Image (cartoon, rainbow, N blue to C red):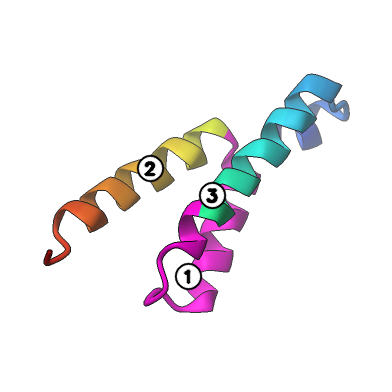
Amino acid sequence: MILFVLTGQIPPILLLTLIVMCYLTGWELYKESELPLLWKVWWVLLVFILNVLGFAIFWIWLATRRRHRPA
């Protein structure tokens, strides 16, 4: 999103990719039932703003969270 604001243009393929990344983030957070809603919204907004970097940070956080969760 920051790149889009700086350039003033949104190529359709990048917009579609951004929408898909936000959808996938929301889908994975939907499975995390014990996580507060505010955290879920925060993660989706982070992915929306930082695009691929935010998506990578989200997956790293989610992987470590799931690894340390008691079985």
- From the viewer's perspective, is the residue at label 1 or at label 3 nearer? 3
* Residue type marked 1: Trp
Q: Quadrant of the C terminus?
A: bottom left
**Residue 5 appears anywhere in the view:** yes
In the picture as drawn, the residue positioned furthest to the front comes out as 71
Task: Specify whether 37 is left or right of 68.
Answer: right
Determine which residue is flagged by label 1.
39
**Label 2 or label 3, whichever comes before in sequence order:** 3
**Label 1 or label 3, whichever comes before in sequence order:** 3
The vertical placement of 68 against 25, above or below, is below
Percent position of residue 61, x then y: 32, 50
Residues under numbered marks 1 and 3 in contact, where contact means CB atoms less than 8 Å apart: no
Task: Specify whether 35 is left or right of 37.
Answer: left
Q: Quadrant of the N terminus?
A: top right
Q: Residues within 10 Å of mark 1 (few under 14, many from 20)?
A: few
Which of the numbered marks, if any, corresponds to residue 59? 2
* Residue type marked 3: Thr
The vertical placement of 66 against 37, above or below, is above
* Residue type marked 2: Trp
Which residue appears at 47% of the width and 53% of the height?
A: 28
Task: Specify whether 53 is left or right of 44.
Answer: left
The total number of labels drawn is: 3
Q: Magenta part of the protein: which range?
A: 28-51
